[in-house]
């Protein structure tokens, strides 16, 4: 994940900071407990595509 891109991306729901999870290739919003997938180096910043982290 490009560091410059990560610096400008924000959670589309709360506008908070995202953390990169290299193991799962996802962007994590700790506040909303959502993981946004990265497909072909493109972050998919849609709530409908995000994985919930509540059960984990």
Image (spheres, grey):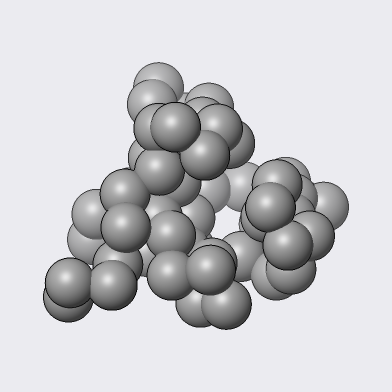
Q: Residue at x 44, y 32 (%)?
A: 48
Q: Is residue 4 left or right of residue 50?
A: right
Report the residue that reaches farthest toward the top.
40
Residue in the foreground of this view, choosing between 46 and 20? 46
Q: Residue at x 43, y 60 (%)?
A: 34
Residue 28: tell me if it is visible.
yes
Number of numbered discs present? Answer: 0
Residue in the foreground of this view, choosing between 48 and 41? 48
Q: Quadrant of the C terminus?
A: bottom left
Q: Residue at x 57, y 77 (%)?
A: 31
Residue 19: tell me if it is visible.
no
Q: Position of residue 47 (x, y in %)?
A: 52, 39
Q: Position of residue 53 (x, y in %)?
A: 30, 67
Q: Position of residue 1 (x, y in %)?
A: 52, 48
Quarter of the figure with residue 52: bottom left
Residue in the foreground of this view, choosing between 6 and 2? 6
Q: Residue at x 51, y 77 (%)?
A: 30
The correct choice, above or below, for 30 with respect to 21 in the image is below
Residue in the foreground of this view, choosing between 7 and 50? 50
The correct choice, above or below, for 43 with respect to 24 in the image is above
Q: Position of residue 42 (x, y in %)?
A: 53, 27
């Amino acid at each position: 994940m490009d560091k410059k891109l990560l610096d400008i991306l924000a959670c589309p729901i709360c506008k908070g900071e995202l953390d990169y999870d290299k193991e799962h290739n996802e962007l994590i919003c700790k506040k909303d407990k959502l993981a946004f997938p990265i497909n072909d180096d493109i972050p998919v910043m849609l709530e409908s595509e995000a994985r919930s982290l509540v059960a984990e």
